[in-house]
């Protein structure tokens, strides 16, 4: 029977019954009764109309559903009568559920949702590396050998990510381009929105939908036409749909490229090596395993293939091979921090639950008489219990729905503030699974916080409640409520201590060395190997802008070279240590804030090849010796093969990534090696953002085809480099703040309630001569006893739990006593503040009024 | 209840359904008519609890044994007429034979041969 049939049959029941009565009345009149008597007789004969209607409804709607509806209506009426109470409960739940949902939506996007590839579960990351250099790259010959000979993999795709200059409508823009081999499209499964994908062996490019709109104004006529890519004409094969989002790892070792979505994909054909070619192209590699093949089996086959190839062709790549699930490569490092955040936010939910349970418990004792009456007039205890659970569920559902809004807002804030702090974070949405999570959490919390007051009612004796005229109290009420608050405070203490440790780590890692003042340094990037004359002109013009104190360029250690010290024992090239190599100019060290520790830095022009090293390099490779005057081999210098003397040592400085330790770094004058991507650093007398436009304008006039991008203060660059840490700290401090607030509300609730109950007792005390101060201290002592118990428990828990975040801390012990002290001090202060209000209210009790109110 | 009703017999549980089906065999009828028909055809012996008529009608609709349609009653008002469905007609046969077997069995017990 359909729902419609049910509605139709029930709808006309009233009319049907009325009709029935009319006919009966008419029949009675026909039998000779007066109309009034006839009507009364008809009603009498029919019996209880309401009961009949209910019985008829029950045919269609099971009685429990009707009662449930009744319970919900009753619950809503009850909450409407106490709007303040309901608001506190709903807001508390909304915070708890909302924060959990927001974090879960991130976990869902990052760790649970499959990658946007075909059969993503079979996708692997294949990398070769050297223990001494963490770069994960693969040389072209290995890619070809695997493609041609491996039987354990279906498809292998090579790619590299870099910044390229694209001639857009009226300017040249720097675009984030993935150069991909044709097999990439088999793995990613893209279908273009316009045009087509590049064919095999074709030099063509496809753009992302966002870039197509941004750079070309969504002008479809560019498809099929050439555009200039790094000054070379390349055909635009097509445009990808906006939904295309094949995840790629961050580019290997390039500080040149800010994080963000790909703007385009440029086709590349992996070529066999030309004999004696000095350059080897390096790729990142992903592959799809054949069905049923384990990673271990694939790895051993791939290793065997490359060993064999190197034996035949020579040119071994990096010695070690790594094959891991591609998802692990992309998000593996984010897993632990995210799970920790999820754990932390569950603690917040625990506190919210305890708080709500507490509030309901307080209300349950206030409602004790109402419940006793209901039980006395025949409501079963089961029915009363169910009423309580329905009230809890109603609160949880309203709180959960509000929580969804909190989650949506929180997610929007995260995406705005730190979109690239966590890989795949931009994919986070509130999808079906997140909604399911929110619903489960809401119902789960309702069961937990609803069970406690329900049990208290279960044990209550109706007779006692009705006789007891002094004041309602639920058995075990006060003790249970204090225990809940103790637990709340303990959880809050754990969160506060964890957040404080993370915050300290962030401060320590971000604190600039004295005198660096990164807020006064402007940095910008230039791309694709600008010629020396261009860079020289850039430096000249930058220095000429008023307000500029120093300006210089550096390649920021983006490449590495094998260190060879003259006179050191000769070792094979593979075993020489790798150090970062930077091409820098005279103004760079003063502009960025690198101090000269020994010797000198570069002059404007250096007629002879020389080099400068940093302290790390000196420490590691010239331990106990004076490096000045020692000579290093310059592999790419104009007089390649020459040794150049070390003329100076500069201080170690984390100038591009605060998270990475300072590497041994070798500086060479930029005019003495072939040009490559450069960064400009400009130190200004005051706020660099103010003179940035004039610097930009002055530099842009040199060569319109060379985009200048990422104009940012050094402070901004450094802040971005700790984005993941900031993300964690931001969330943890939010959680800790919420926890602190909820715990304070918890204490306040218990103490205020107890003061209200003890009004008469306090009145008696005061009538007997207790001073107001004594009353205040009595109330505060009661609150602080609870707080102290919670804090003690919290310290013990924190000592056990903070070890879990040790990996996320920086130069601080997970048991740092000062941090513990500060966090606990804050909690104690909050507790004190929460007790203050009720304490003052207690001291203002007028003994006469208190004793009279009976 | 008035004293004149005392001679009447209250319906056994479940027999109301059977009587409604039987009444509707003759054609669609209004709720009040069904009640009257049952009382009259039993020579006023059976008393239909009027309040239980409607739940019974709805029960039968839910099982698909009867359906209803709107019509206009003699006094020109919209009224609901209940009628037997084919399924209900089959059910009537089943219920009738069940009832007859039960009545015979009870009769045998009360008046052993």
Image (cartoon, helix red, strand yellow):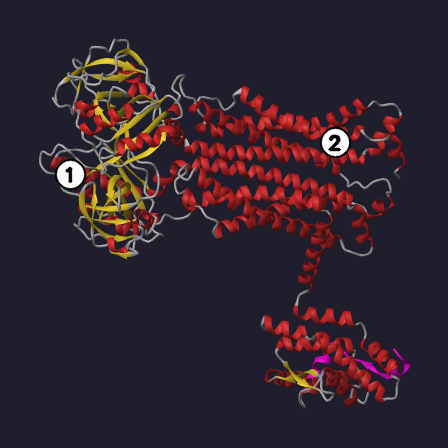
Q: Nearer the viewer, residue B87 or A765?
A: A765
Q: Secondary structure at mark 2?
A: helix
Question: Does residue B2 show up magenta in the picture?
Answer: yes
Residue A185 drawn in magenta = no
The crowding category of the residue bearing disc 2, from other C-alpha atoms within 10 Å (few below 14, some 14 to 19, many at least 20), is many
Judge left or right: residue A6 versus residue A136.
right
The numbered mark 1 sits on a residue in which chain?
A
Report the residue marked by disc 1.
Answer: A309
Q: CA distance from mark 2 to mark 1?
A: 81 Å
**Quick check: A765 left or right of B64?**
right
Give the label on residue A838, or none. 2
Q: Which residue sits at x=65%, y=75%?
A: A9
Mark 2 vs mark 1: give the one in front.
2
Q: B18 above or below A555? A: below
Q: Residues within 10 Å of mark 1 (few under 14, many from 20)?
A: some
Image coordinates of residue B42 in percent, x first then y, are 78, 88
Label whose residue precedes the other's in the sequence (2 or 1): 1
* Nearest the eye: A319 or A50: A50
Magenta stretch in the rendered image? B1-20
Q: Measured from the top left, where is residue A561 in percent x and y?
A: 21, 25
Q: Tell me the quarter of the picture where residue A515 sits.
A: top left
């Amino acid at each position: 029977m359909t729902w419609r049939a049910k509605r139709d049959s029930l709808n006309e029941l009233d009319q049907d019954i009325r009709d029935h009565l009319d006919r009966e009345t008419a029949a009675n009149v026909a039998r000779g009764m007066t109309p009034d008597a006839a009507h009364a007789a008809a009603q009498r004969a029919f019996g209880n109309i309401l009961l009949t209607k209910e019985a008829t409804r029950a045919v269609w709607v099971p009685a429990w559903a009707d009662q449930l509806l009744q319970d919900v209506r009753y619950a809503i009426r009850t909450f409407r009568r106490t709007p303040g109470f309901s608001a506190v409960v709903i807001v508390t739940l909304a915070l708890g559920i909302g924060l959990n949902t927001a974090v879960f939506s991130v976990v869902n996007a990052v760790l649970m949702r499959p990658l946007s590839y075909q059969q993503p579960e079979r996708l692997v990351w294949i990398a070769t590396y050297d223990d001494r250099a963490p770069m994960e790259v693969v040389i072209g010959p290995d890619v070809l050998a695997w493609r041609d000979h491996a039987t354990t993999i279906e498809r292998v795709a090579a790619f590299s990510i870099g910044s390229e200059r694209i001639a857009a409508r009226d300017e040249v823009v720097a675009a984030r381009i993935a150069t991909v081999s044709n097999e990439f499209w088999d793995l990613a499964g893209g279908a273009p929105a316009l045009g087509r994908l590049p064919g095999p062996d074709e030099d063509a490019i496809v753009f992302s939908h966002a870039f197509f709109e941004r750079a070309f104004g969504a002008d479809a006529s560019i498809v099929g036409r050439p555009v200039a890519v790094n000054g070379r004409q390349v055909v635009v094969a097509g445009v990808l749909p906006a939904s295309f989002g094949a995840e790629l790892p961050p580019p290997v070792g390039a500080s040149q490229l800010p994080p963000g979505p790909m703007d385009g994909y440029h086709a590349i054909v992996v070529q066999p090596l030309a004999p004696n070619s000095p350059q080897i192209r390096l790729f990142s590699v992903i592959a799809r395993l054949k069905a049923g093949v384990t990673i271990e089996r694939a790895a051993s086959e791939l290793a065997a293939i490359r060993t064999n190839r190197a034996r035949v062709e020579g040119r071994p790549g990096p010695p070690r091979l790594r094959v891991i699930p591609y998802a692990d490569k992309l998000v593996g490092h984010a897993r632990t921090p995210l799970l920790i955040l999820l754990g932390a936010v569950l603690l917040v939910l625990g506190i919210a639950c305890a708080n709500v349970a507490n509030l309901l418990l307080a209300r349950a004792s206030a409602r004790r008489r109402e419940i006793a009456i209901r039980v006395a007039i025949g409501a079963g205890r089961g029915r009363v219990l169910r009423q309580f659970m329905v009230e809890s569920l109603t609160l949880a559902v309203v709180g959960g729905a509000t929580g969804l809004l909190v989650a949506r807002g929180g997610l929007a804030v995260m995406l705005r503030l730190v979109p690239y702090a966590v890989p795949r974070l931009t994919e986070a949405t509130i999808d079906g699974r997140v909604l399911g999570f929110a619903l489960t959490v809401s119902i789960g919390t309702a069961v937990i916080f609803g069970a406690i007051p329900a049990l208290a009612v279960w044990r209550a004796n109706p007779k006692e409640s009705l006789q007891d005229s002094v004041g309602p109290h639920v058995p075990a009420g006060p003790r249970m409520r204090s225990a809940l608050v103790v637990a709340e405070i303990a959880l809050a203490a754990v969160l506060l201590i964890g957040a404080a440790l993370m915050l300290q780590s962030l401060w320590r890692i971000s604190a600039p060395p004295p005198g660096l003042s990164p807020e006064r340094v402007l940095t910008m990037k230039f791309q694709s190997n600008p010629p020396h004359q261009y860079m020289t002109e850039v430096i000249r013009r930058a220095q000429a802008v008023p307000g500029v104190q120093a300006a210089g360029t550096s390649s920021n250690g983006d490449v590495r070279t094998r260190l060879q010290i003259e006179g050191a024992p000769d070792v094979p090239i593979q075993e020489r240590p790798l150090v970062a190599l930077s091409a820098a100019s005279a103004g760079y060290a003063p502009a960025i804030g690198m101090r000269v520790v020994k010797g000198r830095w570069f002059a404007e022009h250096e007629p002879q090849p020389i080099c400068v090293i940093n302290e790390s390099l000196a420490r590691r490779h010239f331990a106990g010796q004076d490096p000045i005057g020692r000579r290093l081999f310059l592999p790419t210098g104009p007089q390649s093969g020459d040794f150049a003397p070390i003329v100076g040592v500069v201080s170690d400085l984390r100038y591009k990534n605060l998270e990475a330790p300072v590497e041994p770094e070798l500086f060479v004058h930029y005019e003495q090696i072939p040009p490559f991507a450069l960064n400009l650093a400009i130190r200004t007398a005051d706020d660099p953002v103010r003179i940035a436009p004039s610097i930009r304008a002055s530099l842009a006039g040199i060569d319109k085809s060379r985009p200048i991008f990422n104009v940012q203060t050094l402070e901004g660059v450094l802040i971005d480099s700790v984005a993941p840490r900031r993300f964690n700290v931001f969330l943890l401090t939010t959680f800790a703040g919420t926890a602190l607030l909820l715990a304070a509300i918890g204490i306040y609730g218990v103490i205020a309630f107890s003061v209200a109950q003890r009004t008469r007792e306090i009145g008696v005390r005061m009538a007997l001569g207790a001073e107001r101060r004594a009353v205040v201290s009595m109330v505060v002592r009661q609150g602080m006893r609870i707080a102290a118990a919670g804090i003690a428990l919290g310290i013990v828990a924190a000592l056990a739990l903070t070890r879990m975040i040790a990996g996320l801390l920086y130069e601080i012990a997970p048991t740092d006593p000062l941090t513990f002290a500060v966090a606990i001090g804050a909690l104690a202060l909050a507790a004190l503040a929460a007790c203050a209000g009720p304490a003052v209210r207690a001291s203002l009790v007028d003994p006469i009024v208190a004793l009279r109110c009976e | 209840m008035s004293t004149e009703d005392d001679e009447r017999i209250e319906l056994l549980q479940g027999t109301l359904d059977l009587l409604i089906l039987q009444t509707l065999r003759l054609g669609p009828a209004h709720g009040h008519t069904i009640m009257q028909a049952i009382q009259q055809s039993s020579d006023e012996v059976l008393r239909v609890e009027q309040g239980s008529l409607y739940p019974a009608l709805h029960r039968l609709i839910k099982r698909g044994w009867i359906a209803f349609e709107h019509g206009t009653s003699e006094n020109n008002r919209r009224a609901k007429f209940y009628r037997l469905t084919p399924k209900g007609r089959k059910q009537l046969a089943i219920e009738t034979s069940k009832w007859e077997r039960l009545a015979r069995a009870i009769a045998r017990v009360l008046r052993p041969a």
